[in-house]
Amino acid sequence: MKTKKRLLIPLLSILAGSTAWAETPEDYRFPRECTTTDAGYPVPLCGKPLTKTPVIAKQKGDKPLKKYPEYFIPEKETLSDNEMRITAVGSGNPPVRRGQAATSWLVELGNGDNFIIDAGGGTVPALWSLRIPLASFDKLFVTHLHLDHVGGILNLWDSMGWARNTPLHVWGSSGSTPELGVAAFVENIEKAALWHTVSKTGIIAGDGMKIVAHEFDGQQFTPEKPRALVYNENGVKIYAFPVDHILIGAVGYRLEWSGMSMVYTGDSIPTKFEAEQAQGVDVFIHELFIDAPTFSEKNSMPLKIAENVVNEHTPADMLGRVFSIAKPILGVGTHFFVNDYTIDPAFAGIASNYDGPVVIAQDLMVINVTPEQIVTRMAKTDLLSWAAPAPRAKGQKPPKLDPAPTEGRTQSWVTKTRF
Ligand SMILES: [Zn+2]
Ligand SMILES: [Zn+2]
């Protein structure tokens, strides 16, 4: 039936003299048939989340639970007032792969707010494919300034400049010196992008080409003051707390809204402290790293270097320990190389210390959180998606164009030869 229908639509369009081909994102298929690993987990990239607990009821009772379609299709589901949707925009590592970009998470709330946490390399196309008005993406929280977490900022900033005429706001920590903080990072991005912004002045809205840093003090934390409220608007509270990741300035975030909560810790060597910061959350997203010999072999990396990298991260059995203290309703391992042969050892390692519900993230995995349940699915999105229709974001004024530059323009002997 499906095949017939798909052939019929273009044929009818031709007969009707129309060039409008049906745009049906549902027709985008995952690249693989779904089989399972030896331990019974779906294989990566087959359209199923990597878990055995895709649906978790939070409370026992007779109330019927909301049913979700098998896949999340952009624009086809609206969030209810009391619902949170968390999307793995990028679930991978610095060696960005076509099937797994670096790190980025999107948190959408039923009140209309959304938050991007980290914007690693290669993540922006997946974000755009979610068909959310680009103008509404203006809040980015950065866990730390490793490029696999911030390497996509230029792309994020640029793409949004087309659709938005308000600045991109970036929250993040200070470092141990002014040069190592998020404010200096943003200032340097603006300096590096000067040719870009000067050349576009007078063509696109100037305010959309601005980035504003909101740097909080990364050295304020103590055992007595383990976390700081760094965002508090519209009923949304976001707390930052330090994590053990090489330098001062690496933080995790805990977002609380309407009785629901999520924590994302960025990168870290596992600690009891960070586990305690995530206690009782609905969704705890924590990094997970493959073992050094596999990392070394698959990336053609000397074992010593692979060990150095792995030692700054979280092996599977330690993630189990972290989850066993935090006891989230759903534990999420991310920043992991998902391959058929990496899945089972990771789940086995986690299970050696923890028996609660766990999922390993893939790009475009979607988690819906309500007071009643947590449901994990995969999204299907259009590979050639256009920008979503853009109702003006709240508070946005009509675009204002600054005067175009008069100095330093392309030499007249070149422009005189224009056709
Ligand atoms: Zn990282
Ligand atoms: Zn890092």
Image (tube, rainbow, N blue to C red):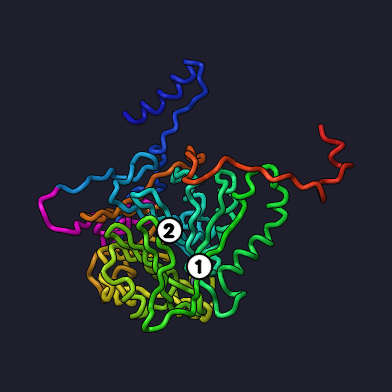
| Residue 54 sits inside the magenta stretch | yes
Residue 83 as seen in the image, left or right of residue 408: left
Q: Is the C terminus in the top left, top right, bottom left or bottom right quadrant? A: top right
- Residue 359: x and y in percent read 31, 62
User: Would the CB of label 1 be found within 8 Å of ligand 2?
Assistant: no
Residue at 41%, 26% in the rendered image: 7
Amino acid type, callout 2: Trp
Which residues are drawn in magenta? Answer: 38-63
Decide whether residue 295 is among the magenta residues. Answer: no
Q: In this view, does 109 lie above or below 150?
A: above
Q: Which residue lies furthest to the left in this view?
A: 62
Could you tell me residue 410's position as x and y percent?
82, 46
Which residue sits at x=26%, y=56%? 374
Residue at x 49%, y 51% (from the top left corner) = 137
Q: Residue at x 51, y 52 (%)?
A: 124
Q: Which mark is residue 172?
A: 1
In the picture shown, does residue 214 fall above or below 196? below
User: Quick one: label 1, few (<14), some, or many (20+) residues within 10 Å?
Assistant: many
Element class at badge 2: strand
Q: Quadrant of residue 316?
A: bottom left
Is 330 in front, or is 241?
A: 241
Q: Do the residues labelled 2 and 1 touch (CB within 8 Å)?
A: no
Relative to 404, is 108 on the left or the right?
left
